[in-house]
Amino acid sequence: MTMHGRFYTLKSLGMVREQAEIGPLAGQHDDAAPKLRQDSKCRMRQQCSTPGGDTWGHKVPKGVVAGAMAVMLAACAGMTPGVSRDASPQVKQTVVAERAEARWQALIKGDLDTAYTFLSPGSKATTSLAVYKSKIKPGIWRRAKADKVSCEGEICSVTIQITFDTPKAKGIETQLAESWIIEDGAAWYVYR
Amino acid sequence: MNTFKRKSLYAALAGVSALGATGAAQAVNVNPDGLGQVLIYPYYTTRADSAGNTYASLLSVVNSTSSAKAVKVRFLEGKNSREVLDFNLFLSREDVWTAAILPSLSGGGARVGTADKSCTLPALPAAGQDFVNFAYSGGSSPNDDGGGGSLDRTREGYVEIIEMGAIRDNSTTHAQITHVNGVPPGCASVSDTQAGRDTTVLTGGLFGGMTLINVASGTDYTEDAVAIDNFGPGGVSLYFTAGDIKPQLTDSDPNSTVFGVNGAIVQTNWSLSANSADAVSAVLMHDNILNEFVLDSGTKSGTDWVVTMPTKRFYAFVGTGNAPRLFQRNFNTTVGSCDDVTLDLFDREEFAKAGGFSPAPPGSVNRICWEANVITFNNPNPAVGAPTPTLGSVNSTNVPTSFQNGWMRLGFFPSSVTGNVHKLIAPAASTTFTTIGGGTTAPSTATYFGLPVVGFAVQSFSNGLLSVGGVNVLSNYGGNFVHKTTRRITP
């Protein structure tokens, strides 16, 4: 598994300077949920040896720290860092933001197989991998960052800040709205 | 600043008409070669498609001439053509300006942003400039058109770029806006006062296009701007200050030329006409719009037609009842300003069927009610105003059909259209018909049939899994096709 360790949780919440450098969640093809748990655990394990919180000296809201810490502690304790609809808002926001950015990293790299693993079970039931791959044309996106996450029960809305390039103009920034669902202990992208 | 007065100019040119000299060298025309003094981009959108994926619209304008230019860039929302933003743009010689129309970051509308270095008045903020609803909202404001005051209206519409004139070489403004090593040195110093002094007659040579890109899926559609040439009245500049709603399409030369109507060249002098938009309307008049549709279930195809009427706002006014001229009805709150139309559908095997919008309007007469309309086919949600599957437009109407593919003819003369509705009547002794090798008729009145429209169709295809050399590749396509049209102009 390729991991470029950064404090991704804080990054996804806009608390770090650097743009995403997370590698693709390689090998995440067939059984997304167990892989996700494994990825999260490894990521958290790295963070366990990193001073938690503001690596680059930025101020971090207490709630975000609490959410991040909750996920980290779960991982460090060897627990599956899953998430449920009843988790605290901070935990849900943190997990969903991380997953949303990871999906976009796969898209940016043109790795549609990995991007597909983020789809909710319901989305996968109605959209096969082949159809999904026929509907996405990678190559225009440069950067993606989860700007805002809000959850109500198991349903979460994510605002993604996208930077993309086209033949007419480069470096265009815009926002996209995404729907995510918390199910089976993980967050999943709802693809329509 | 130039203080051009259209009425006085028209009055002066009225003498030309009186002489029956309609064959003016300067006459507004659509340039099929794509270069002009005015560009009309039929559609922009920041709406989301049926998958919830948002569009961005990327605009470019090219100054192909060796003269620097001042142009007015105007964005108009699609329901009632109310202006949502305009500014003055300065293009140095052979310059290109690009911009992106994107969802607003702070509100429910759209915004325009650019990384381009060309000067604008006023300067555009780095994060982009939000579109505004001042021209159609406000409750008791006289601007309130009753069509809904939400910024959401700004999320789809169309764009005009009108040349205000060439900038004199070696002038102050020329030096300020001409790129040096890729950057104009004096944008901060550009002023309307000086630019007005330094701007001279229009010289044309503009062209441009728009890309409607679905950011989440990476697919796109493209459109060319319709180029109107010889727009400017002879001998004057059309420079107006930033913040002035002028120049508009009503500020044209009063002469129009239409080529190739039954082999003839039709020239009309509209100086004595009651509506100063007539010259531009005349060159956009069509009595039928034709295009294809593809709805194959196997390819999950969808088709949306864009039908934009860029001069409608000068004929249909806020209120109930009939429009006074050319168009059928005034702009009646959220109903819009509706024009009755006919729909004839044909499949690919010449089987014809009369079509109808769904749900059927009162009286079962098909209508299109906005200034930038999107007509879709077999929308799973057929309600009026439901987002279209491909472009996500809510200025929408739906045509249900059992045909998987074929073509449609949209006409402007159902039995409910009578009298002078959908007809542009030219003044007496204003129009000549010149047949190549066949001479020129004596000046007479003339009737232009139909409505002034521009537009195109977009078609989406999804072929599912497509394997090329053992590798799965993108098989989701978008195509766009400019509308084909017929014209009818009679003496």
Image: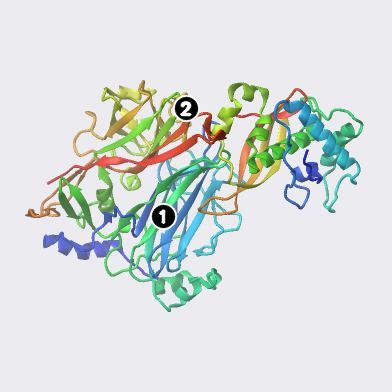
For the residue carrying disc 1, how many other residues have a C-alpha within 10 Å: few (<14), some (14-19), or many (20+)? many
The residue where tag 1 is placed is: B208
Q: Chain of mark 1?
A: B
Q: Label 1 is placed on what type of residue?
A: Gly
For the residue carrying disc 2, how many other residues have a C-alpha within 10 Å: few (<14), some (14-19), or many (20+)? some
Mark 2 or 1 closer to N-term? 1
Element on which disc 1 rests: strand
Q: Label 2 is placed on what type of residue?
A: Lys
Tell which residue pokes out farthest to the front in this image.
B469
The residue where tag 2 is placed is: B300
Task: Please indicate whether residue B125 sits to the left or right of residue B382 in the image.
Answer: right
Residue at 70% in and 43% down: A147
Residue B330 x/y as whole percent? 33, 39
Residue B379 x/y as whole percent? 44, 26
Task: Please indicate whether residue B226 sits to the left or right of residue B286 in the image.
Answer: right
Residue B164 x/y as whole percent? 38, 64
